[in-house]
């Protein structure tokens, strides 16, 4: 198994802001130039010291679509391959940087060259529509995070099974912060924690959500279930912007 590592030199990123669709296209093109000239792409094996983890997770032996987004060679967020040249992640992974070509909580990153797909590097499909997962469906989460609240990361990629909660429980825990049309919340014996952001919520082999937020004071809280961005809500935007840079 390999893990794709996208190394981001944030201190050298150009100052770019998003004010409309045309600006977003311009930003993607400038970011494409920046990636070509300033970023390093490589793959690393699990024998390297990669900071990955999930609360109460088990080792994930084969997740060839997983991406580690790194700043100064340190993992900051997860992501996942949706094409040979595009990575999907959470927008707030860029809070410390200046690129803001985003819609709500979704960010797509362009790799400096197309990846050669093989048995160890593969894509994960996105929903075709209406595949967000119904309440009580069993799904899985994986990512680059702490193994418990304020705890240590793992040296292995971990994952956990979770159950999609009904929206009443999501609203009970998060109130107005939870938006039905854009979010999914889940709970299980294991779950996401800090630095898992950007990784996928996988149901039936399809990425239906992006790790977004949870209770940092109590990772995998029963009262405040972990929340994921609903990918289907942003599919038109994702597909449209992927077409702008070839």
Image: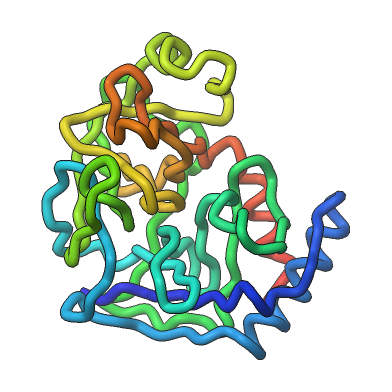
State the image coordinates of residue 53 (x, y, percent, origin top left): 24, 55
In this rendering, would 99 be left or right of 159? Answer: right
Q: Residue at x 63, y 52 (%)?
A: 238
In this rendering, would 69 be left or right of 142? Answer: right
**Does residue 156 lie above or below 211 as drawn?**
below
Colouring used for the render: rainbow
State the image coordinates of residue 77 (x, y, percent, origin top left): 44, 59
The N terminus, quarter of image = bottom left
Q: Which of 60/82 is in front?
A: 60
Q: Residue at x 43, y 49 (%)?
A: 197
The C terminus, quarter of image = bottom right
Q: Which of 180/129 is in front?
A: 180
**Does residue 112 lie above or below 165 as drawn?**
below
State the image coordinates of residue 98 (x, y, percent, origin top left): 71, 62
In this rendering, would 177 be left or right of 193? Answer: right
Q: Residue at x 73, y 68 (%)?
A: 28
State the image coordinates of residue 2 (x, y, percent, origin top left): 26, 76
In this rendering, would 76 be left or right of 140? Answer: right
Determine the image quadrant of residue 50: bottom left
Q: Residue at x 47, y 84 (%)?
A: 41
Q: Which of 65/219 is in front?
A: 219
How many numbered markers are drawn? 0
């Amino acid at each position: 198994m390999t893990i794709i590592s996208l190394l981001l030199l944030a201190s050298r990123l150009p100052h770019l802001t998003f004010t409309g669709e045309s600006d977003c296209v311009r930003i993607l093109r400038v970011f494409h130039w920046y990636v070509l000239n300033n970023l390093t792409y490589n793959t690393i094996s699990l024998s390297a010291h990669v900071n990955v983890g999930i609360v109460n997770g088990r080792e994930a032996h084969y997740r060839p679509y997983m991406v580690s987004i790194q700043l100064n060679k340190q993992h900051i967020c997860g992501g996942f391959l949706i094409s040979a040249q595009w990575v999907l992640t959470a927008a707030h992974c860029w809070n410390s940087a200046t690129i803001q070509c985003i819609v709500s909580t979704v960010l797509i990153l362009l790799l400096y060259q197309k990846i050669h797909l093989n048995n160890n590097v593969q894509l994960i499909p996105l929903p075709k529509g209406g595949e967000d997962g119904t309440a009580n469906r069993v799904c899985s989460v994986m990512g680059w995070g702490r193994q418990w609240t304020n705890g240590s990361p793992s040296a292995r990629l971990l994952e956990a099974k979770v159950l999609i909660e009904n929206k009443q429980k999501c609203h009970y825990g998060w109130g107005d912060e939870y938006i039905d049309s854009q979010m999914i919340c889940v709970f299980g014996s294991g779950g996401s924690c800090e630095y898992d952001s950007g990784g996928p919520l996988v149901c039936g082999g399809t990425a239906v959500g992006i790790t977004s937020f949870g209770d940092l004071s109590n990772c995998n809280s029963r009262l405040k279930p972990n929340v994921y961005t609903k990918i289907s809500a942003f599919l038109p935007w994702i597909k449209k912007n992927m077409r702008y840079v070839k």
